[in-house]
Amino acid sequence: MFKNVRLFRLDTPFNLDVAELEAQLGERRFRPCGPIETATLGWSAPLGEETASLVHGVGGCLLLCARKQERLLPSTAVAEAVDERVSELESGEARDVGRAERRRLREQIITEMLPRAFTRSRRTQLYLDTEAGWMVVDAASEKQAEEVVSLLRETLGSLPARLPDPHGTPSTIMTDWLLADTAPNDFVPGDACELRDGDDSAGVVRCSGQDLASDEILNHLRAGKRVTKLAIDWDERLGFVLAEDLSLKRLRVDDALLEEMDDTDLEPAARLDAEFAIFALQMRQLIARLDAVFGLLSGR
């Protein structure tokens, strides 16, 4: 299940079917780091490593998974090894080691240390909603999302996709929701938010477990702070923190939507398939509501 969401609008219809997409992703299938590689990035099975397919389709949505593996080489360890090597050269040859030679030594030491370095992997799931025309990426940061989107562009040759460009300013709209109690009926503010000064991004108030209708919160807003993140329960179906860039964090599906699966003995892959089917349908409807409230693409 996705924990975060970053949205990208598909500017043209996505016409590849599962088999065609599978074939293209296979050209960039994930492989582990080689002895002197710092990182590799490729496509992995979205339903788990025990399955082979790189694409899983449900209800017009194509689920993919990018996997990145990195070698962990702490900069402090490299710096210490460089200092030791420089000290040996300077004492043994009675000369100073210049900046250029020090850089060469650092590159040499990294090459020597890489094959012995530990590795770690990170999986990033995403899916293409071919019916609604959106790509949904489970990424906690913009950098992580862009890395995966770039991989998909490289794999397919092109992928016309862009971030939301809303009509209104989301922070202004969310501020009005709290200040004037004007949130839509299906967007119920939760108990957490982030407030920032309009003219000073360094002035930040983060609230958790608070009554957002209290005088304490409202006084911050009356003093000019604006809402940049807001916990929301949407229509008793999804809960999340909505940020001013329209990304979602701490995403959760309401337990009532998953109750039926608790009574069935599903294999892990089958359970993930069922959860994804529920999640993708709810997200399609949520994106439509976000579009209605914020106007996700002003250029339309």
Image (cartoon, rainbow, N blue to C red):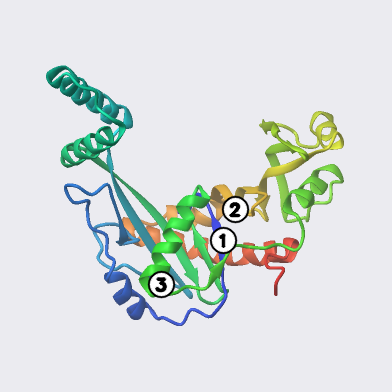
Q: Nearer the viewer, residue 262 or 185?
A: 185
**Residue 7 position within the rendered picture, expressed as x and y whole percent measured from the top left:** 56, 61
Name the residue carrying label 2.
247
Name the residue carrying label 3.
57
- Label 2's element? loop
- The answer to whether mark 2 and mark 1 are in CB contact below 8 A is yes
- Sort mark 2 into few (<14), some (14-19) or many (20+) by Cα contacts within 10 Å: many
Figure quadrant of the N terminus: bottom left
Residue beneath the point at 42% across and 58% down:
125
Compared to 239, does 8 lie above or below? below
Extreme residue in the front direction: 95
Mark 2 or mark 3, whichever is nearer to me: 2
* 148 left or right of 172 in image: left
**Residue 34 position within the rendered picture, expressed as x and y whole percent measured from the top left:** 18, 51
Residue beneath the point at 46% across and 65% down:
127
Q: Nearer the viewer, residue 140 or 280?
A: 140
- Label 1's element? strand
- Sort mark 1 into few (<14), some (14-19) or many (20+) by Cα contacts within 10 Å: many
Compared to 71, does 91 lie above or below? above
Q: Quadrant of residue 16?
A: bottom left
